[in-house]
Image (cartoon, rainbow, N blue to C red):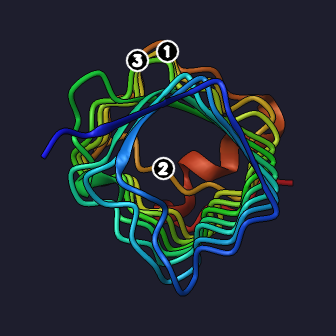
Amino acid sequence: MSTKFIADQTFKNQDYTKTRLPKGEYENCTFKGCNFENNYLDNQNFMECEFIDCNLSNINLAHTIFKEVTFSHCKMVGLKFEDCNDFLLNFTFENCILNFSSFYGLTLKNQSFLACKLVEVDFTEAGLVGANFSGSDLSKAIFHQTDLQKSDFTQALNFDIDPENNTIKNALFSKESLSGLLVKHQIKIE
């Protein structure tokens, strides 16, 4: 059975909580105000698509392909992005809630997390060279053996990054946020 090819379509205010999005290859499609919560997006292909104001919390992403996909103002709690197909994996997050999600072991060069909530997100062993965390809240986010070279944390909030357990060469930090690099030493900065 061949996979259905769907291009240049807009899906607006659709409820996929009881029925699945039809399996296919979606190219240059827009999903606006759709609810996928607690359902499956596994084995789907999304190329140059945009998700706006969607709820994708707790969905299954096994073997899903995201190539040049933008998520804006989406709720994406508890997702395991490491279950995606990592071939050509490329996405951008803007004003999204990604709390309790995981990017364990993924290589995401120049990844953008702009003004996102990333509370307790797992970035363990991820390759985030050149990532941009501008305006994002990283409360209790896990950075362990993470490659953060050339990443931008100048406007990030509430991060705790141990320079001894992560690679931070040429990463950018503001003077005001340097305490996020010293948390384990229990130093008080005034």
SS type, badge 1: loop
Report the Cα–Cα distance between label 1 and label 2: 14 Å
Tell me the CA gap for discs 3 and 2: 13 Å
The one nearer the camera, 96 or 132, is 96
Of circles 1 and 2, the one toward us is: 1
Instruction: Judge the density around disc 2: few (<14), some (14-19), many (≥20) Cα neighbours within 10 Å.
Output: many
Q: Could you say which is closer to the camera, residue 23 or residue 94?
A: 23
Identify the disc placed on residue 169: 3
What amino acid is at disc 2? Ile
Query: Residue 186's spot in the image, x, y percent?
Result: 56, 68
The answer to whether residue 13 is left or right of residue 62 is: right
Q: What residue is shown with label 1?
A: 150
Tag 2, which secondary structure? loop
- Above or below, 23 against 147 in this view is below
Of the numbered discs in the image, which one, if any, rests on residue 168?
A: none
Label 1 crowding class (10 Å Cα cut-off): few <14, some 14-19, many 20+?
some
Q: Residue at x 62, y 69 (%)?
A: 119
Q: Position of residue 7 (x, y in %)?
A: 55, 25
Residue labelled with disc 2: 161
For the point 40% across and 17% down, the residue is 169
Q: CA distance from mark 3 to mark 1?
A: 7 Å
Residue type, mark 3 in image: Lys
Q: In the image shown, does 27 or 95 lie closer to the viewer?
A: 27
Which of pointers 3 and 2 lies earlier in the amino acid sequence? 2
Q: Is residue 112 left or right of residue 104?
A: right
Write the residue at 23% across / 35% down: 86
Q: Circles 3 and 1: CB distance less than 8 Å? A: yes
Which mark is in front, 3 or 1? 1
- Total marks in image: 3
Q: Amino acid at mark 1?
A: Lys
